[in-house]
Amino acid sequence: MIDHKVRAHPSKDELPREEQLAWKMAEMAADPVAVDDDVTEMIINRIIDNASVAIASLNRGPIKSARAQAKAHARTGGATLFGLPENQRFCAEWAAWANGTAVRELDYHDTFLAADYSHPADNIPPVLAVAQQCGKSGAALIRGIATGYEIQVNLVKGICLHEHKIDHIAHIGPSAAAAVGTLLGLDKEIIYQSIQQGLHCTVTTRQSRKGEISSWKAFAPAYAGKTAIEAVDRCMRGEGAPSPIYEGEDSIISFILNGRTARDQGKSPYEPSYIVPLPAPGEAKRAILETYTKEHSAEYQSQALIDLAFRMGKKIDDFDKVKSIILHTSHHTHYVIGTGAGDPQKMDPKASRETLDHSIMYIFAVALQDGEWHHVKSYAPERAQRPDTVRLWHKISTVEDPEWTRRYHSPDPKEKAFGARVVITMEDGSVIEDELGIANANPLGARPFARPEYIKKFRTLTEDILEAKEIERFLTLVQDLPNLSPEQVLALNPVAPAGYLQENPAKGIF
């Protein structure tokens, strides 16, 4: 790996493109290096994972809306949608929109946490849609997905967007654009311009994950994927992009990220820098192996705490005798999904599912009482509004612990942790205390996910929806991904039985 120092530059520097981060990412994306076998196997796992959570969400509101929009853009020789047969084809960008929304809706697919947050499997829907429309093989699809993961993971390691209240989809715009470039075998110039357009058009604020969280949380990554496809299309037709997109005097670093902070403090906006690692020429793209999926349908920073709640709940006979529960945790957990966020909505029994998903107080209370977690039942209004749960929920708070913050950001995977130390004080003064650093399903956890667990997750989430023969068809096909023909790639989205899909009857512009 090569560590690239990235900072803003005044226009008079005329920064050569070879020194620009977007060009270095484009060079990596265009590198014809082979994909390692273990990376290929993990890509298959994540396609299975995406399909499982997408099928489980097919009749939820945002997916019905996104599917309705996609269905208004039918195209001969286009891409397919989750749930629909492959003879129904749609424009790739709209297929990516609908499929990406389905993948994201339940907040139940993979994650990578470092300087910022990410769900790298958000790169898969746009790459798959373009592969289907452009007639690419399973092997080409693998190469594209490997690039998407590589760029997003390494941007997340090096550049914190959350610090400046920018949503993490700003890292998907460049990664998905580069991934499509690799899939199509485009040259560096086109990929370079596509990365820059992909970033420029996907810089949005984190209000999508703050306060009353709406359905846009599910749409946001799909928007980035759709935008990336459109950016690549424009650049393939000879169009350019704002440049240099990261380093420019009026661009991302200078006016949105650390350069703005420096300016606010009366300092030069050109001095603060980021370090972004990227594979050297000829070095394999292996970043996907650093990522992890979710066993529970909730924000990743709650995964270990759900496991811990299961364990601690067994020690409590009467939850009404709990006096207080304090979660000693990292800065990110405290300020994003904890009481440090200052969001009263996180304590509101009538809050949206999206908001409850980002309330560790709610999640810990329900997991503590139930000893299990379900992607629908655990968020149901009747569950959230149960009086004994509300009483317990409102006794829970979080505090930042510097040691957990240090571990959260540790580059050492054996130290890295996304959990907490939990102190439960009972009315009689007795204390129950325990801690867990990483979720059981994490690669370093007690029960790491491997192929059998991904398949089990798929079966669990789809067995009440898909016909048995469709489950077997999809699982057999996807596990042969390196050998799939373009025709077989078209069949990678599972098909729901006739009459299952519910549609949004509302009319829009399209």
Image (cartoon, rainbow, N blue to C red):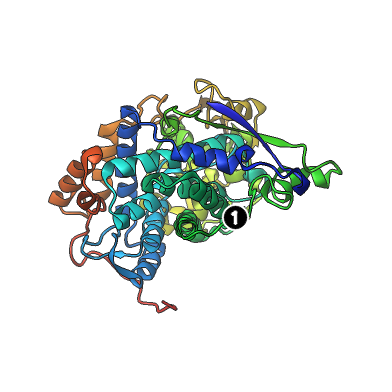
Closest to the observer: 431 or 122?
A: 122
Residue 262 in picture, x, y percent from top left: 79, 42
Left or right, 56 with reference to 256: left
Answer few, some or many: residues within 10 Å of disc 1's Cα (few below 14, many 20 plus, some between 14 and 19).
many
Q: Does residue 401 lie above or below 197 as drawn?
A: above
Residue under the point 70% across and 48% down: 248
Q: Does residue 3 lie above or below 79 as drawn?
A: above
Left or right, 405 with reference to 187: right
Residue farthest to the right?
266
Residue under the point 57% across and 43% down: 22
From where the camera sits, is residue 192 visible? yes
From where the camera sits, is residue 396 visible? no
Closest to the observer: 41 or 62?
A: 41
Q: Does residue 10 lie above or below 328 as drawn?
A: below
**Callout 1 amino acid:** His
Mark 1 lies on a secondary structure that is helix
Left or right, 174 with reference to 124: right
Residue under the point 58% across and 47% down: 394
Using the rendered view, name the quadrant where residue 42 is placed: top left
Left or right, 273 with reference to 155: right
Residue 448 in picture, x, y percent from top left: 36, 28
| Residue picked out by circle 1 | 200
Residue 462 in picture, x, y percent from top left: 25, 50
